[in-house]
Image (cartoon, grey):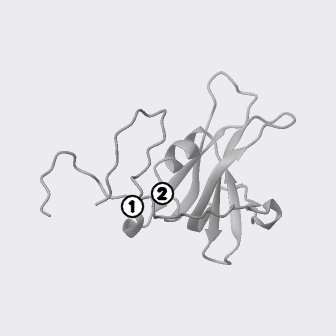
Amino acid sequence: MAKYMAKKMTEVVTPEVSDSAVVEFEEVSVDASQIEQGIPLKFELLGDSISGVYERRGKQDAHGDFREQMYYDIRAESDGRLYRLFGNSNLNALMSKVRIGSRVIVEYINDEPIDGRPDYNPRKLHSVKVAKSDKVPTVTRGAARKL
C-alpha cells in the first residue's frame, strides 16, 4: 500500500517514491477544432424529447444580449448525433443530479409563467429520466464493511 502524508489542502500531496524510480511525463494537448460540438436543440412543443447518452456539460459564455448559460450535450439514440440543450433554472436543477455517461430521456412537459414578468415567455419545465442501471449508488456513511 502506498504511503501518503496528510497535508493542508493548499499543498500538493505526493506519494513517496524511491530514488531509483524515474517517471517521465508527456504534454497533453487538445486541438479545439477536433472537439465535436453539439447541434443546438430547442424544444418547441409540449412532449418534445430526446433520449440518449449524456456526454458533457459546460457553460456557454455570455454574448450580446445573452447571459452565461449551462448546456448539456446528449448523443441521441435515434441517429447517433450529438445535440446540445441549453439550461434554464428547472433543467439545471434536474441535470445537476445526473452523472455524465448516463442514459437519459429529457422531455419538455409544461410551461410556467414568470412571476411579475407577463411580457416574458413562460419558463419551460422538463422531466429528466435516468436509466436505473446508470443511477449513482446511494452511500451509507458509517456502515461497517467486511474486507
91 versus 46 height, above or below: above
Q: Is residue 95 left or right of residue 6?
A: right
> Disc 1 vs disc 2: Cβ atoms closer than 8 Å?
yes
Q: Give the residue type at disc 1.
A: Lys
Residue 81: name its quadrant: bottom right
Q: Can you identify the residue that label 1 sits on?
A: 135
- Pinpoint residue 144: horizontal percent, then vertical percent: 12, 53
Q: Can you identify the residue that label 2 sits on?
A: 99
Residue sitting at x 41%, y 59%: 18
- Pinpoint residue 56: horizontal percent, then vertical percent: 61, 58
For the view shown, which residue lies furthest in the front direction? 20
Q: Residues within 10 Å of mark 2 (few under 14, many from 20)?
A: some
88 versus 118 height, above or below: below
Q: Give the residue type at disc 2.
A: Arg
The answer to which of marks 1 and 2 sits earlier in the sequence is 2
- Pick the residue in front: 82 or 140: 140
- Pinpoint residue 17: horizontal percent, then vertical percent: 42, 57
